[in-house]
Image (spheres, rainbow, N blue to C red):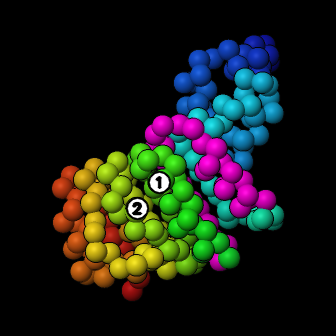
Amino acid sequence: MTKNLEVFSTSGISELPEDLVLKILSFFSIEHVVMTSLLSRRWRSLWTRVPRLKYNVVELKNHTSFERLIDKSLLAHQSHVLEILCFKVNVWQWNKYIGPWIRTALNHHHCHLRELEIDASIVKTLLPPELFTCKTLVVLKLKGIVINVVEPLTTVCLPSLKTLHIDRSSLFDFESLRLLLSSCNFLTDLVVTRNS
């Protein structure tokens, strides 16, 4: 067993094809992915092409440095398609940042976002209207008591959306939900859970 571990050393993983390394890195949180840039010259910018960005801001002590990490990693990200953007947040001071971070991801990737997942528990979160016109979005999962939109929904165009989960959110009143559902012709997985 020890021999096998020695064979699969840092140099061994560096010899793997880049696509496979990116796939492996995509399962880690962004903090760990960025740390891989210290391994070698080849790894210095490899993290910027990971197709999944996952931010977990639940158990942090230094929120300011993590906030800078999110800002920089979203702007430095170079993958043409962002498969998954995931925020797990329970820090109430961040309510003003999540919307702009989503807007940055949408603008930076020319709206080639496939999946967005927000778990905001009790954090007030304002979603940008651009999110509801993202033609490549396939999965949208929103969990949180106070997720809302910056302005009332008037235009919704999510032609690729297949999965929509809204958990404990008062985001959509009946008319907004009707507008949203009427624009999703390929929706196959719908879960709406309201607070009682």
Amino acid at pointer 1? Leu
User: Which of the image's four quarters has the C terminus?
Assistant: bottom left
Q: Which sits in the foreground, 69 or 62? A: 69
Is 143 left, or right, of 9 in this rendering?
left
Give the answer, above or below, for where 27 lies relative to 117.
above
Rendering coords of residue 125 (x, y %): 53, 74
Q: Quadrant where the N terminus lies?
A: top right
The structure residue drawn at horizontal position 35% and vertical position 63%, both measured from the top left corner, is 132
Count residues near mark 2 (Cα–Cα under 10 Å), then give few for <14, some for 14-19, many for 20+. many
Task: Residue under label 1, please give it.
Answer: 106
Q: Amino acid at mark 2?
A: Leu
The Cα–Cα distance between marks 1 and 2, rounded to whole angstroms, is 8 Å
- In the picture of the structure, the residue carrying the numbered disc 2 is 131
**Circle 2 SS class:** helix
Occupied quadrant, residue 181: bottom left
Is any atom of residue 138 visible in this view?
no
- Residue 188 x %, y %: 24, 54
Percent from the top left, x then y, of residue 147? 47, 75
66 magenta-colored: yes
Question: Mark 1 vs mark 2: which is more N-terminal?
Answer: 1
Q: Secondary structure at mark 1?
A: helix
The segment highlighted magenta reads: 65-92
Measuring from the top left, give residue 26's x and y in whole percent.
58, 38
